[in-house]
Amino acid sequence: MPREGGSLTPPEGLQHLWLPYCQMQLAPPPLTAVGTEGCRITLADGRELIDGVSSWWTACHGYNHPHILHCMEAQLQAMPHVMFGGLVHEPALTLASRLSKLTGLGRVFFSDSGSVAVEVALKMALQYWRNRGKAGKDRFLCFSNGYHGDTLGAMSVSDPEKSMHKAFRHAVIPQFVVDIPADEYAFSELDALLAGVQKELAGIIIEPLVQCAGGFRFHSPDVLAELRRLASKYEALFIVDEIATGFGRTGSMFAFQEAGIAPDILCLGKALTGGACGMAVTLASEEMFSAFLSGSRDDAFMHGPTFMANPLACAAANASLDLFEQEPRLQQVEAIEAALRDGLGGCESLPGVVDVRVKGAIGVVQLRPEIDSYALRPRFVERGVWVRPFNDVVYLMPPFTISGEDLQALMRAVREVVQ
Ligand SMILES: Cc1ncc(COP(=O)(O)O)c(C=O)c1O
């Protein structure tokens, strides 16, 4: 079977790997990456690919940014890791203060991946209501096409039918799943549903403005603001999952800010470290936090990942925030948005295309569902670009630092392959 875009023999050791979301009996052997720099990935055979995916949407400043490397190297010499129970450290203190200022949420809880940040958010919401003496508020309202991660709690609030979690549908806690309302009628239906389930409802969880892994579907800031209003009306915590959208991807630093709202709980991850290493956070309002303060240890928040607030990851995240302050990232996103509108717009008239949409540095070409988008993957590698269509979408989420030339090359490849 040919490799994904080549014909070399599979790498030694592949027989011991178990790859993610991958039917390993059918999938072509993966390519071996040996280096990254800027917006390029270098392969073992010497080829260079222009990256249109930012390593699952993390590498917002491109790869190996010297400022991030420098800060991580300094931290590596001082203290690569120390436990966060009973001890704190300067990189975490600084990062928590900066994130709190950027988001308006007073408290930061560290974890090691986006899925865990979502678990933490759900557990915070459940324990909040218990601590407030409201028993029975232990279900969540979530949305069709939503995706919040791969752990059991995160799967329970993701789309139960269309996400990659179908196989676990029987095993996860059932939640209330609705379509994101698009008009007044849908909102009045949702209002009625919420009125009926208020006593059971702990929170509403949503990916703001763009549902990413569920097919890059967009909704408006007005819809988000109205959902926030309904959450308050029916005593539900409003949980905003910005793991994919946060740090500029939709055009503003955080997507929820476009709706002028304040979440009760916010999840961040992915681009938090500029893509240099794994880390995530769950932020909560001071009001949320105050529900965990009492004379009883039982009221303390019961969670604590071993590697939480890893100092190396905190150093990377602080360096990434420096770059947002020092370099014109949001202007770069604006320029990418304009280029994507221009460059992908032409795909609309192609026979296999159902829709083309752009928001910030996210460009989406939606294909007719019968088209096997996975079969298109090697064609991108043949053209020297790293683009990974899935289900019915071909999408671009490049690093914000991508040059105009490289972005044009990505879009040219999308046009040619889709054609
Ligand atoms: C919105 C959202 N939430 C949560 C996650 C899970 O993050 P992780 O893969 O770091 O566990 C993802 C990952 O794609 C995501 O897009």
Image (cartoon, rainbow, N blue to C red):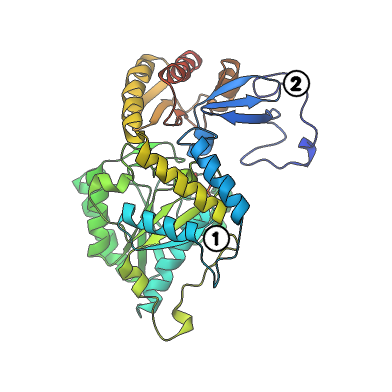
Q: Nearer the viewer, residue 288 or 66?
A: 66
Q: Which callout, 1 or 2, points to the residue nearer the camera?
A: 1
> In the image, is 230 to the left or to the right of 119?
left
| Numbered disc 2: secondary structure | loop
Is residue 175 shown to the viewer in this render? no
| SS label for mark 1 | loop
Q: Which mark is residue 149?
A: none
Give the residue drawn at x 40%, y 14%.
350
Percent across and percent down for residue 419 are: 47, 13
* Image location (x, y in percent) of residue 116: 52, 57
According to the picture, the residue beneath numbered tag 2 turns out to be: 8
Q: Name, please, the residue furthest toward the bottom.
A: 295
- The spot of residue 119 in percent (x, y) is 49, 60
Among numbered discs 1 and 2, the one appearing first in the sequence: 2
Q: Residue at x 26, y 41 (%)?
A: 220
Residue drawn where x is 45% and y is 28% of the image: 396
Does residue 396 appear in this view?
yes
Q: Amino acid at mark 1?
A: Met
Q: Residue at x 36, y 26 (%)?
A: 336
The answer to whether 200 is drawn above or below residue 189 in the figure is: below
| Residue 310 vertical position relative to residue 48 in the rendered view, above or below | below
Q: What's the distance in space between the residues labelled 1 and 2, CA to CA? A: 40 Å
Instruction: Please give the residue where the numbered disc 1 appears in the rendered image.
Output: 308
> Badge 1: few (under 14), some or many (20 or more) residues near its Cα, within 10 Å?
many
As drawn, 5 above or below 155: above
Mark 2 neighbour density, 10 Å: few (under 14) some (14–19) many (20 or more): few
Judged left or right of residue 87, residue 288 is left
Residue 163 vs residue 402, the one in the foreground: 402
